[in-house]
Image (cartoon, grey):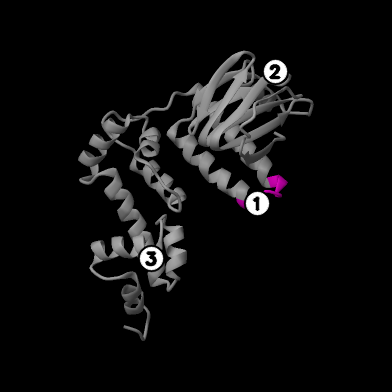
Amino acid sequence: MVTSAEVMSLPGDAHTHDHEYHQLVLGMYGDTEFNIAGLGQHITAGGGCLVPSTTDHAFAGLGSNQIMVVNLPWNLHYSQQEYELISRLFDNASYFNMSSQLQVLAGALGRELQHHPQDDLLARACGNTLLCALQHQLEIPAQRITGQIDMDLIDDYIRLHLHRKISVGQLAGLACLSQSQFHELFKRQNNMTPHQYLMEQRLRRARHYLEQGRALSQISDRCGFSSQSALTNAFKRRYGTTPARFRRSAQPGQG
């Protein structure tokens, strides 16, 4: 399939238009407002919509936001299998919620697009991957084991977003649970709260970087600490020593 994909932020002023191509929109961060053929809905992180070609739609950003857009030209040659997939997905305008698996995939692909915004081959590959993954989600309802959180998905999300602030609400959304349900189940399953678990992941990554001899300012940024002092305080509480002392002891010939 021939697609293009990009990550962008929507302006606060509402815009209305249509275009000669299908469009897939995925909410990555913050809140946006869409109105497709008279049907309005907010799209937050984990949500999305399908906009068929020539369909009037309006959109606006509500504060800080980020979406991924996949554009799909309709007037190009497609194989029969591709044609059928596109026809099924864009038969009608619709809104949907991404499964936890699709959220993790979209997040990873979105970061690649941001790192390489001029790579057209990457943009097409990302767009095609997301369309196929969405088709599977919409045709085969996501299954999850009752009473069991998929920690592989949680760990993947934390690893990919460790440099940012991560809320319990975001993690609960991955598990398709309310925050209170997620908190209770997570603590029972892992013997610690989501906040404690997240802090442990940040500190483990910080310790790994310290063993490599990286600068504290770089480590605090990459591990999602608000400052070097926040990293130092948390590290000392967990390991009983400061990051600087730990780094010296971990380097050969120092200590």
Q: Quadrant of residue 201?
A: bottom left
Above or below, comparing residue 120 to residue 149 in the picture:
below
Total labels: the figure holds: 3
Q: What residue would you read off at disc 2?
A: 55
For the residue marked with disc 2, what is the amino acid? Thr
The spot of residue 111 in percent (x, y) is 56, 48
| Left or right of 150 on screen, residue 17 | right
For disc 1, the neighbor class at 10 Å (few under 14, some 14 to 19, many from 20) is few
Q: Earlier in the sequence, mark 2 or mark 1?
A: 2
At horizontal 39% and vertical 70% (from top left) the residue drawn is 210
Front residue of this view, candidates 11 and 7: 11
Above or below, comparing residue 177 to residue 222 in the picture:
above
Q: Which mark is residue 116?
A: 1
For the residue marked with disc 3, what is the amino acid? His
Q: What residue would you read off at disc 3?
A: 208
Region in magenta: 115-121
Q: Earlier in the sequence, mark 2 or mark 3?
A: 2
SS assignment at label 1: loop
Q: Which mark is residue 226?
A: none
User: Is residue 118 covered in magenta?
Assistant: yes
At horizontal 38% and vertical 47% (from top left) the residue drawn is 155
At horizontal 40% and vertical 48% (from top left) the residue drawn is 158
User: Mark 2 and mark 3: span between their CA atoms?
Assistant: 51 Å
Residue closest to the far bottom? 253
Above or below, comparing residue 244 to residue 223 in the picture:
below
Front residue of this view, candidates 19 and 77: 19
The spot of residue 115 in percent (x, y) is 61, 52
Front residue of this view, candidates 8 and 112: 8
